Image (cartoon, grey):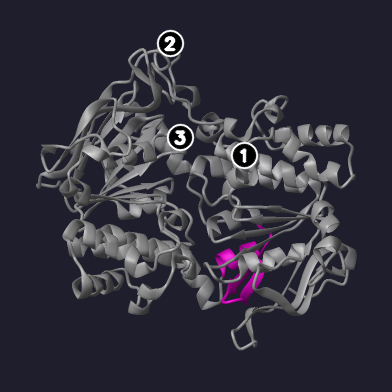
């Protein structure tokens, strides 16, 4: 971006910025390599690129901060004309509290669970004495309304655990904006959100940034999100700017091969209508009439009933995608199958035989056949063990392997997940996010399982790494015949990888069937909402989408578990009062075992 002659209009500027790590021999290892760009008042500049491209490192320079082990080597990071690179924390403390604010990826980790929301939202301006408590409270109340939060007059009195993830993400924006900063740094603030919540959060972010007259740096790997919120895009790879320009130009006419590669990694929503080939083998796992929940029994049922009358079949060598918003019961279903949460009612069979509902009652052979890959590889891998020990443990436990046999198999498994043999000597903290997820897969495959439960395994990965993981899963399935249960809030990824889709809403199966049937009419109204909420890679899509009837009806403060009637009724544009809200919906069956639970006929849903 050329240097702006109207200096007061430039809120933040980096010029020839170099940030380096220090090698063991004392020499510098450049991480950020001569980056240049500007952020103007009222403008959102997006930094995009895959993991390790330097996005977060560069964005943190706007706060005058570098991570431990790094240092500003040369160049400048100017906030309102003042170079803040290399200033001490004491000098920067008021700058970080008044002039620039930071929004992290995880709102849940940002908020203190023991302090009420409003106290945390107003803390910075009161602490820095730019506002009295009364003034900060008024500002917070204004922001709660501007961010379209439910019950804005009372939400500040709640604790963080009492609001949904999407609401908490917006409350984090209120926290950042309460002190009237000139610059916001948003670091992957929507990555972990489901598609319907993403739309609401993006709409709220875009509106409040415009109304507040703030500037923003938006760090993300999601080009579809960038197309909706950014005015200018900076494409980064290996700490260097590969391409930069207005959003419309980058999205519609990318020039650099790396930018084109980023776009090619985006999964468009598959279209239905292709021929379905029904499976003939006996299923690996069957879930029948399943009810499950959490908490002590009350009136003979768990205090919090989550799953109700769930029926799912997982064929051998196939992938079942499970889709739904946060709170719909996706992870609960996986925990029940894995034996981590015994069902209250119903049963599970493995290879046609009843499977013990409790993990501790399962035989080693039953444990071996069902493996779990968790969303957060950071917490799933023991940080004190080398990779060879992490992968080698199931080899010893399930197969009794020792010594050279185990070492040989560890290296084979590393090869299967496309990692080199020297990785066996590394610790988890020495790997990238995508590499850690591959180690988690290798550990699961070490058991030689029949079914692998994948719970949001790509949601925290950038588009290129996520696409590589999906390609890897496909190849492993072809080579080993393993079945996958693939849980995600990303309908595009589920649709491109799965053989069948289960649409869960509030613990019930709203729709189930082959991919081509679920993604083509007739749709359950909730499935239609999910499809319409999948972001498209074009400028202006967000504004068009929020005006549609299905989106306006589907806006919600969260998923509500209901004892009677259809749980989607309060959000459904086709709901029939007196029926949908009081009577459980019938199961309607279409072609190829395509089933929809809805009071409307299949013809009405087409």
Q: Which residue is mark 1?
A: 168
Residue found at x 57% / y 71%: 53
Q: Is residue 245 left or right of residue 568?
A: right
Q: Quadrant of residue 16?
A: bottom right
Q: Which residue is mark 3?
A: 327
Q: Quadrant of residue 10?
A: bottom right
Residue found at x 44% / y 63%: 384
- Residues in magenta? 230-253
Q: Which residue is mark 2?
A: 578
User: For the residues marked 3 and 1, what is the alpha-carbon distance in whole angstroms?
Assistant: 14 Å
Q: Position of residue 361 (x, y in %)?
A: 21, 37
Q: Quadrant of residue 119?
A: top right
Say whether disc 3 or disc 1 marks the residue closer to the N-terminus. 1
Disc 3 crowd rating (10 Å Cα; few below 14, some 14-19, many 20+) is some
- The C terminus lies in quadrant: top left
The answer, for residue 161, to whether it is visible in the render is yes
The answer to whether 469 is drawn above or below residue 260 in the figure is: above
Disc 1 crowd rating (10 Å Cα; few below 14, some 14-19, many 20+) is many
């Amino acid at each position: 971006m050329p240097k702006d002659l109207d200096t007061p209009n430039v809120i933040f500027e980096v010029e020839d910025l170099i940030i380096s790590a220090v090698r063991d021999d004392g020499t510098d290892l450049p991480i950020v390599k001569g980056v240049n760009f500007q952020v103007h008042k009222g403008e959102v500049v997006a930094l995009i690129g895959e993991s390790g491209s330097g996005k977060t490192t560069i964005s943190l320079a706007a706060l005058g901060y570098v991570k431990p082990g790094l240092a500003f080597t040369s160049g400048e990071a100017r906030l309102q004309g003042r170079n803040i690179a290399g200033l001490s924390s004491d000098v920067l403390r008021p700058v970080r509290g008044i002039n620039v604010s930071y929004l992290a990826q995880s709102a849940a980790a940002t908020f203190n669970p023991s302090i009420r929301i409003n106290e945390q939202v107003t803390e910075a301006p009161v602490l820095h004495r730019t506002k009295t408590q009364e003034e900060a409270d008024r500002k917070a109340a204004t922001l709660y309304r501007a961010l379209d939060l439910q019950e804005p007059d009372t939400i500040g009195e709640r604790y963080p655990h009492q609001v949904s993830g999407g609401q908490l993400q917006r409350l984090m924006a209120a926290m950042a904006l309460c002190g009237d900063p000139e610059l916001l740094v948003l670091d992957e603030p929507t990555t972990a959100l489901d598609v319907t919540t993403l739309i609401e959060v993006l709409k709220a972010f875009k509106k409040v940034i415009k109304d507040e007259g703030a500037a923003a740096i938006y760090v993300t790997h999601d080009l579809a999100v960038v197309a909706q919120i950014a005015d200018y895009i900076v494409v980064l790879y290996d700490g260097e700017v590969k391409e930069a320009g207005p959003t419309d130009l980058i999205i519609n006419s990318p020039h650099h091969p790396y930018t084109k590669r980023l776009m090619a990694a985006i999964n468009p929503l598959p279209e239905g209508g292709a021929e379905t080939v029904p499976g003939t083998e006996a299923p690996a796992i069957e879930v029948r009439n399943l009810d499950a929940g959490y908490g002590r029994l009350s009136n003979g049922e768990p205090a919090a009933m989550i799953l109700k009358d769930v029926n799912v079949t997982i064929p051998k060598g196939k992938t079942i995608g499970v889709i739904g918003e946060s709170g719909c019961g996706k992870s609960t279903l996986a925990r029940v199958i894995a034996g981590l949460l015994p069902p209250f009612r119903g049963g599970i069979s493995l290879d046609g035989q009843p499977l013990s509902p409790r993990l501790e009652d399962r035989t080693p052979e039953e444990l071996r056949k069902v493996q779990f890959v968790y969303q957060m590889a950071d917490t799933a891998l023991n940080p004190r063990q080398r990779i060879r020990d992490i992968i080698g443990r199931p080899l010893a436990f399930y197969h009794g392997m020792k010594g050279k046999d185990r070492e040989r198999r560890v290296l084979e498994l590393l090869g299967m997940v496309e990692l080199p043999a020297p990785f066996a000597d590394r610790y988890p903290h020495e790997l990238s996010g995508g590499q850690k997820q591959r180690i988690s897969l290798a550990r699961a495959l070490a058991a030689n399982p029949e079914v692998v439960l994948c719970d949001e395994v790509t949601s925290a990965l950038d588009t290129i790494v996520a696409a590589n993981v999906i390609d890897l899963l496909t190849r492993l399935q072809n080579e080993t015949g393993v079945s996958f249960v693939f849980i995600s809030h990303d309908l595009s990824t589920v649709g491109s990888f799965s053989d069948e889709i289960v649409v869960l809403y509030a613990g019930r199966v709203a729709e189930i069937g082959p991919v081509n049937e679920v993604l083509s009419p007739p749709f359950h109204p909730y499935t239609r909402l999910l499809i319409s909420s999948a972001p498209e890679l074009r400028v202006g899509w967000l504004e068009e989408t929020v005006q549609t009837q299905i989106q306006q009806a589907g806006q919600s403060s969260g998923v509500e578990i209901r004892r009677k009637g259809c749980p989607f009724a309060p959000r459904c544009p086709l709901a029939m009062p007196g029926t949908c809200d009081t009577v459980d919906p019938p199961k309607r069956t279409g072609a190829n075992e395509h089933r929809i639970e809805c009071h409307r006929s299949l013809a009405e849903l087409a």
